[in-house]
Amino acid sequence: MKLWLVVGVIFAVLALMKFYAYRRFLRHSVVFRSHRILLILLLSALYAGELAFFFLAKDRGFDHRTYIALGSCVIVSYGLFLACVIGDISRSAGRAISTRATNTSAMELLDSGRRRFLKIVLDLGVLALFVFFSTKSIKNALSIPKVREVSVEIDGLETPKSIAMISDVHIGKMIQGDFVRGIVEAINALNADIVVIVGDLVDEDIAFVKEFLLPLNDLQSREGVYYVSGNHEYYHGIESISAFLKTLNLKVLENEHIELEGFNLAGVSDLAGSRFGILPPDIRRAQSGLNPQKPSILLAHQPKFVRQNDVSAFDLVLCGHTHAGQVFPLSIFVWLDQHYIHGLYRLDSKTQLYVSSGVGFWGPAMRFLAPSEIVNLKLMPSSQHTRA
């Protein structure tokens, strides 16, 4: 029931976005005002494409080109909506300034010819914004992310350590081998002590993505590559995905930990495991036997795991899942579900949490005001405390 409610809200919002664009162009646009039927057809086609994308995108018979075409409807719709909103804000602001300056309505001072000219200029401005928002969101999604360096002080850490962290690659219909190779090259350039992959690596049937996962064998680090599952692995068969990943040059952490040179590293399966009844997360098992003389780091895909479980045994928790909202203003809904969106948080006097915005995307190829990232975590000995 909860899932259908979320889906219903999404589709309602998409419909309201089309209605807003319709009203905006019908009321203010010189070009579309006299082409009401054409405008309705265009917006209806966009909405139909969006519905088809969300209903059919996970169909295994869905070919790559159709996926891109229908996903583009979502991108176009989003870009159009943002452009219309900013266009209306700009027009209202200009009208308010003119009215204050002259103490009369700005539109009353203009003859019909000048009003028509200004409306055409505004239409062109909205068109330019639409092109910018659409192309920028696509570029943000498809480009290899920049490296974000984050320094974290860890109580009890004897020597500095570095962790290259990625999450939410979503390898599948859109993100494939070339993108993965680019990520691997960027990580290897960091010369990190360890590499961690914090869930949602795979977003398709394992038979479809095996070839795209092979570049992960080239990941380089001093003390290994470690992975925990995300919710999307459960959607596509966690057991078969996990079995294949175990054949690669990485260590799958399933409710277990490993003692490294400078700290303990633990990993729990995703919260989706409880819903599916397969490999559910087990924090007690993961932390059992931790070396108390070393600081401990936990990998858990969803940030809300730290609100549902006691993670006080750990000095640092690394999560992903949120995509930092992926497109503005979806970060609001992410906060409502997860409470944490992106960045470094302090949970208590001991435990810190870092939430990555991820390197890939879910759904259509778009990211806006929520940049992706490869995280270079610089772990430093605490300057204030020492471990007992």
Image (cartoon, grey):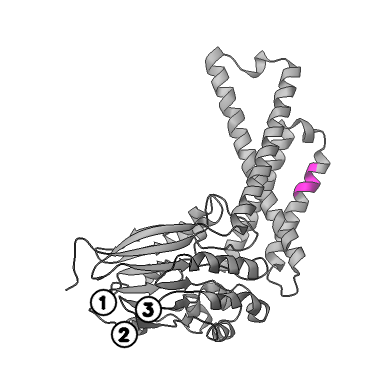
The answer to whether residue 318 is above or below residue 234 is above
Choose mark 1 or mark 2, whichever is in front: 1
Give, as a three-letter code, the residue at label 1.
Answer: Lys
Q: Which mark is residue 294?
A: 1
Across and down, in percent, residue 73 comes to 72, 54
Mark 1 or mark 2: which comes first in sequence?
Answer: 2
Mark 3 or mark 1: which comes first in sequence?
Answer: 3
Q: In percent of the image, x 39 and y 64: which residue is there?
A: 377
Task: Place residue 194 in its image quadrant.
Answer: bottom left
Across and down, in percent, residue 202 comes to 58, 74
Choose mark 3 or mark 1, whichever is in front: 1
Across and down, in percent, residue 316 comes to 33, 68
Q: Which residue is mark 2?
A: 288
Magenta part of the chain = 39-43
Q: Which residue is mark 3?
A: 266
Q: Is residue 341 visible in this depiction of the protein?
A: no
Image quarter hosting the N terminus: bottom right
Secondary-structure class at tag 1: loop
Secondary-structure class at tag 2: loop
The answer to whether residue 104 is above or below residue 240 is above
- Residue 228 belongs to magenta span: no
